Amino acid sequence: MNERSTYGLTPVEFIKLALAEDTGSGDHTSLSTIDNNKSGSARVKVKENGIVAGIEIAKLILQCVDESLEVQIKTTDGSRVKAGDELMIIGGNVRNLLKAERLLLNCLQRMSGIATLTREFADAVDGTGTKILDTRKTTPNFRYFEKLAVTYGGGYNHRFGLYDMILIKDNHVDASGGIKNALLKASEYLKKTGKNLQIEIETRNLKEVEEVLNTGIANRIMLDNFGTGPLAEAVKLIAKRFETEASGGITLPNARMYALTGVDFLSVGALTHSYKSLDISMKIIN
């Protein structure tokens, strides 16, 4: 697992802050009830079917808590699991096992929930050539893990933040005086700064799509809340001159209908803001 080398917290920085938040002045329950030299093992099991994600993160959490903990990994990120499957067995100091427990489970449960939902969307559009994208609708400082989970579920990452793509949304269009002005200003900005960034622009109707086509600057056109009929018409009008992305109102029941319009990408904010965490537990076994 590669740590981010650009902006934001690295995984290790996140883990250290999360452990500090949880532990505070000490785990006084374990300190008062468990001998310091008590050793044992813990079993991490999944309690429902899904796609597992967060195994490598869990290993990193355990290393940050106690490098001497022994970890037996039973599966890999992106694997299908069923209720009752073991994900890992951990051995070592029991106080440290319990110190790691909640953060380890929080990450595994959330990431596996995202991966499971993403896989459902990816399966729904299988064979159409359309890719499932995430969005920036993520948890602050947990974005790296959420977007990693999307890839384990068979989806793809949209821009990570505000800095790695120019995405001209409706508010930008309106504030800059329209589609043409926004695109010309973005193009000039890239020339002045020497930055090598893709330009995507959101459109709300076919008239705005035609404005983008006439300007000819963008790399990708976002077709927001078009519905499948207007979307198919827009995709045909664009005719592969630009990448196309549909957003807004896309659900599991209708995802395939959207994909069958020939659109290149479906962006689904629900992947990271409306998923259900997978039920996973950790139990001390001796």
Image: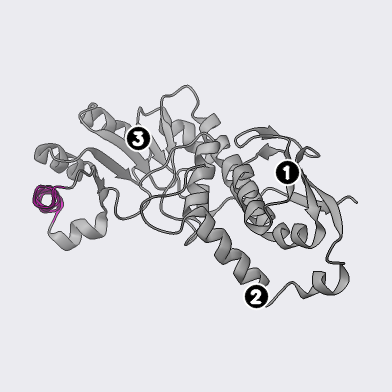
What separation in Å lies between label 2 and label 1 (alpha carbons)? 26 Å
Specify the amino acid type for callout 1. Answer: Val
Q: Secondary structure at mark 3?
A: helix
Say whether marks 2 and 1 touch (CB < 8 Å): no
Q: Which residue is mark 1?
A: 71
In this view, 69 is above or below 28: above
Query: Along the polypeptide, which appears first: circle 2 or circle 3?
Result: 2
Residue 133, horizontal then vertical, whole percent: 42, 40
Task: Tell me if I can see residue 230 in this picture.
Answer: no
Q: CA distance from mark 2 to mark 3?
A: 55 Å
Residue at 44 percent of width and 47 percent of height:
249
* Mark linked to residue 6: none
Q: Residues within 10 Å of mark 2 (few under 14, many from 20)?
A: few
What span is in magenta? 178-194
Secondary structure beneath label 2 = loop
Q: Is residue 87 located in the magenta-colored stretch of the structure?
A: no
Q: Amino acid at mark 3?
A: Gly
**Residue behind mark 3:** 229
- Asked if 189 appears above or below 158 in the picture, the reply is below
Q: Which residue is mark 2?
A: 24
Residue 228 spot, x, y in % from top left: 38, 36
Amino acid type for the residue under numbered disc 2: Gly
Gap between marks 3 and 1, in whole Å?
A: 52 Å
Q: Earlier in the sequence, mark 2 or mark 1?
A: 2
Q: Quadrant of residue 267?
A: top left
Residue 185 falls inside the magenta stretch: yes
Image location of residue 21, percent across then percent down: 60, 71
Q: Earlier in the sequence, mark 3 or mark 1?
A: 1
Q: Residue furthest right?
A: 286
